[in-house]
Each structure stands twice: as structure tokens, then as C-alpha cells.
């Protein structure tokens, strides 16, 4: 195995404050994960980029460059991937809203996307492009605590997939979701264009900063022509047809949190030794089931990476 060199991370928390889609635990999730990365996995704080919409709640705080817009998130991820060398460990943690984009009428199903604070969608095709650009010998782990996050790296191999067991959750929580219809309505208000084609609205609003899926759709198949086992690893908070929970236990005095992010952090805290990505996911599933959640996290990666140590942990030390 190649020697581990740099450890780079981009952490994004998107609460959508002061909107009908407002969540409460997303920023807490990534702030807590930053602490885990530093103390457990040896990341240098200077190599961790944190993007949140905390300033949007008050109109004060970080500059617009620090907001989790589509352009800023993609720029941070592209920069991280471009810096990677063989042996480097890359990590992207997203906690925020997700959505499903209906495919054209002649195709079946949906595509998955995350919803940055400006509605400039980042799709499964964008994540596939990033993985395809990764330097050989580097690894790139994505943890997406968002609705419909299963399959967020398009065409990645499924290791732990959909569950047939569905139970009605007794918990009260808010889904980390912005419905596609709401996105279309918002973008239509911005562009004034009378069309149900979301790509038209995104291109009009964001131009060259739009998702690759809409910017150059004719190139999309070419991304997968020579697809083979790669170093992309996706830990999704739920299946593609499910929602992920945002908890705000104010009555108990606890901080708000995302159910999946919290479950992963609990697993890491309770198991100081090195765990494989598959072990982390199976344990996180058990935590969520025990807590009464009806979401089922999934793992997508190569066979080799499923059994490899999560984030290439070097030392078995508790944090």
C-alpha cells in the first residue's frame, strides 16, 4: 500500500436558516466531524476546509466565499482533488438537503443531487467526474448525510444496499430534503422562464458553474465508457428513495444533529481500533435501528475499499 501523505478534507454544513427548509443539526455535524478528523485520523486543521451557511442566519460572519454555494463547494472539491498525490486521503462530508431529479421522459428513474445554499445542484455526475480525475493511489471518501444520497457517485459499485425492511419511525424529525418541485418553483422565480426543464433554469442562473449533467449532457456517457474499480467511497445516509433525519432535541438540552452523522461519530467513539468502511456502515445501521430511525445507510465502493480501513487510520487511538 502506498505511503499515506496528505490528509485533505472539505466539510459542508447547510442548514438553510430562515427558510421553509430550515434544518438545525447540519453545521453541528461537520464541526463535530472536524474534531474527529483531527484527533482520530491525524488530519491537519489547516488542510480542512469548512463551508457553512451560519452567517446567513444573522447576516454577519464569514464572507460569501465561505458560504456553501454550488460554485464554492465544487471549487473546494476540485482544488482538493487536484492537490492529491498517490497515498493521499481525501474526505468530503456533506450534511444538508438532498433531492431527486426526474430523468427525461424516455428514461426511467431519478438522479441524485445535493442542494447547496443557492440551489445550484451538485449531481451524481459531478461526483463521478471528481472520482475519475483522482490521481491513482489516492482515496476519496464521501459521507453524505442528506436525503436520497444513495448512489450519489454515479455507477459506483454497491456493497451495502437497500434494505427490504421498512418500519414506521416513532420519532419526530425533519427530513433533510428539498422537493424537486420546490427547487423548480424557486428557480422559475429567479429566471422568469416558463419551462419545467430544471437544466434550463440552472444554466440561466449559474452559467458555467452549473452541474456537468446540465452543462454538457452530451458528454455524460463518456464519463463511464472506461469505468472500472476506482478509489471512490460513498457512505450515504439513506437509500436513494429514502430521507435522512435532522434531529433538534431542544427539550432535552442537546445539540441538534443529523441522525447518520451522529451514528457514524458514535461508532468511531465506541471503537478505537481501525474499522473498515463496511464495518462502520453496518454498525451505524444498527445504531440507527436501535434509535428507531427508518433510514438505511448504504455503502458504494470497490471490493477492496469496502474492506480497507476507514480513512486509512494509522494508529488505534481513541479521540
Image: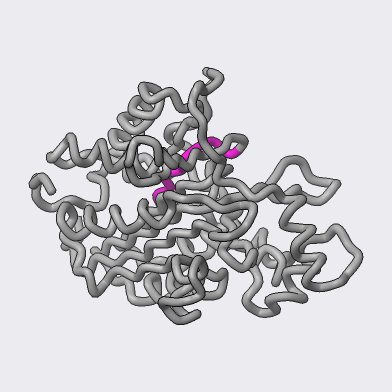
Residue 297, percent from left and from top: 45, 35
Q: Is residue 132 above or below residue 60?
A: above
Query: Which residue: 62% across, 35% down?
Result: 241
Q: How many marks?
A: 0
Residue 296, percent from left and from top: 47, 31
State the residue in front, 75 or 295: 295
Query: Which residue: 43% across, 35% down?
Result: 159
Check the image and name the residue furthest to the right: 194
The magenta segment is 229-240
Q: Is residue 75 above or below residue 139?
A: below
State the residue in front, 299 or 76: 76
- 145 horizontally vs 253: left or right: right
The answer to whether residue 42 is visible is yes
Residue 33, percent from left and from top: 29, 54
State the residue in front, 134 or 276: 276
- 9 horizontally vs 144: left or right: left
**Coloration of the structure image:** one colour
The answer to whether residue 112 is visible is no
Magenta-span inclusion, residue 218: no
Q: Quadrant of the N terminus?
A: bottom left
Magenta-span inclusion, residue 236: yes
Quarter where residue 2 is shown: bottom left
- 252 horizontally vs 162: left or right: left
Query: Which residue: 38% across, 62% down?
Result: 11
Query: Which residue: 18% across, 55% down?
Result: 41
Amino acid at each position: 500500500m502506498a505511503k499515506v501523505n496528505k490528509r485533505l478534507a472539505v466539510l459542508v454544513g447547510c442548514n438553510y436558516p430562515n427558510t421553509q427548509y430550515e434544518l438545525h443539526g447540519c453545521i453541528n455535524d461537520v464541526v463535530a466531524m472536524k474534531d474527529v478528523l483531527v484527533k482520530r485520523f491525524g488530519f491537519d486543521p489547516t488542510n480542512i476546509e469548512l463551508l457553512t451557511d451560519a452567517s446567513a442566519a444573522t447576516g454577519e460572519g464569514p464572507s460569501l466565499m465561505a458560504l456553501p454555494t454550488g460554485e464554492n463547494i465544487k471549487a473546494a472539491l476540485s482544488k482538493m482533488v487536484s492537490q492529491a498525490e498517490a497515498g493521499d486521503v481525501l474526505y468530503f462530508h456533506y450534511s444538508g438537503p438532498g433531492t431527486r431529479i426526474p430523468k427525461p421522459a424516455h428514461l426511467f428513474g431519478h438522479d441524485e443531487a445535493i442542494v447547496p445554499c443557492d440551489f445550484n445542484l451538485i449531481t451524481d455526475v459531478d461526483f463521478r467526474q471528481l472520482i475519475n480525475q483522482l490521481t491513482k493511489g489516492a482515496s476519496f471518501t464521501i459521507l453524505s448525510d442528506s436525503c436520497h444520497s444513495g448512489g450519489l457517485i454515479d455507477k459506483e459499485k454497491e456493497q451495502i444496499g437497500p434494505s427490504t425492511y421498512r418500519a414506521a419511525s416513532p420519532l419526530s424529525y425533519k427530513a433533510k430534503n428539498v422537493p424537486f418541485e420546490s427547487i423548480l418553483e424557486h428557480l422559475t422565480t429567479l429566471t422568469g422562464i416558463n419551462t419545467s426543464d430544471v437544466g434550463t433554469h440552472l444554466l440561466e442562473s449559474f452559467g458555467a458553474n452549473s452541474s456537468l449533467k446540465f452543462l454538457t449532457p452530451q458528454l455524460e456517457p463518456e464519463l463511464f465508457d472506461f469505468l472500472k474499480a476506482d478509489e471512490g467511497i460513498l457512505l450515504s445516509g439513506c437509500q436513494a428513495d429514502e430521507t435522512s433525519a435532522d434531529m433538534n432535541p431542544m427539550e432535552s438540552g442537546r445539540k441538534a444533529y443529523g441522525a447518520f452523522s451522529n451514528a457514524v461519530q458514535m461508532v468511531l467513539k465506541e471503537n478505537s481500533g481501525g474499522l473498515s468502511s463496511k464495518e462502520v456502515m453496518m454498525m451505524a445501521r444498527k445504531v440507527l435501528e436501535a434509535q428507531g430511525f427508518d433510514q438505511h445507510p448504504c455503502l458504494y465502493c470497490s471490493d477492496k475499499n469496502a474492506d480497507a480501513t476507514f480513512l486509512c487510520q494509522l494508529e488505534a487511538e481513541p479521540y
